[in-house]
Amino acid sequence: LRRAGRVKASSAFFGNLFGVKPILISDRKGQNYALKKVKGIANARNAVLELVNEAVTEETKVLNIVHGDCLEEANLLKDLILQHHSFEEVRLANIGPIVGASVGPGTVCVFFYGKEVTIEGND
């Protein structure tokens, strides 16, 4: 995120030092915003699970998880989500090079059709 200009160098340094993980969400326009910041990977997984719990509906059939060269972490998140929800299909894939250049290795993204996202940024 620092290299892509999304966070300042000082924020990135202290974030890495203290294990801060930003939870990002895309708004209706496709812009990404930091919804919250949590400390540690386990807390990040739980924060994503909370967001999934809020948005999954009975009509949700497919869960998509993409990762930036961290298949093991993607599988841990998948297993956590599947403890709480069932899907007809679960897809795991790598993040492509364009998005990967912005978010970097270690990123895990979850997306699916569910409740409408109503977050709208100011940009």
Image: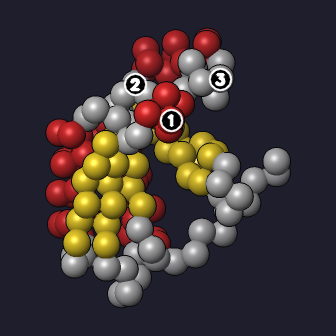
Q: Which mark is residue 19?
A: 2
Going by the numbered disc 2, the residue's amino acid type is Gly
- Looking at the figure, which quarter contains the N terminus? top right
Q: Residue at x 60, y 24 (%)?
A: 4
**63 sits left or right of 88 in the view:** right
**Quick one: SS at disc 1?**
helix
- Of badges 2 and 3, nearer the viewer stands 3
Q: What residue did someone put label 1 on?
A: 98
Going by the numbered disc 1, the residue's amino acid type is Ile
Q: Is residue 28 above or below residue 57?
A: above
Q: What residue did someone put label 3 on?
A: 5
- Which quadrant would residue 42 be assigned to in this image? top left
Going by the numbered disc 3, the residue's amino acid type is Gly
State the CA–CA distance, disc 1 to disc 3. Answer: 15 Å
- Of badges 1 and 2, nearer the viewer stands 1
Classify 10 Å Cα crowding around label 1: few (below 14), some (14-19), many (20 and above): few
In the rendering, at what x and y percent does residue 83 appear?
Answer: 18, 66
**For the residues bearing labels 1 and 3, Cβ distance under 8 angstroms:** no
**51 sits left or right of 85 in the view:** right
Q: Residue at x 49, y 28 (%)?
A: 101
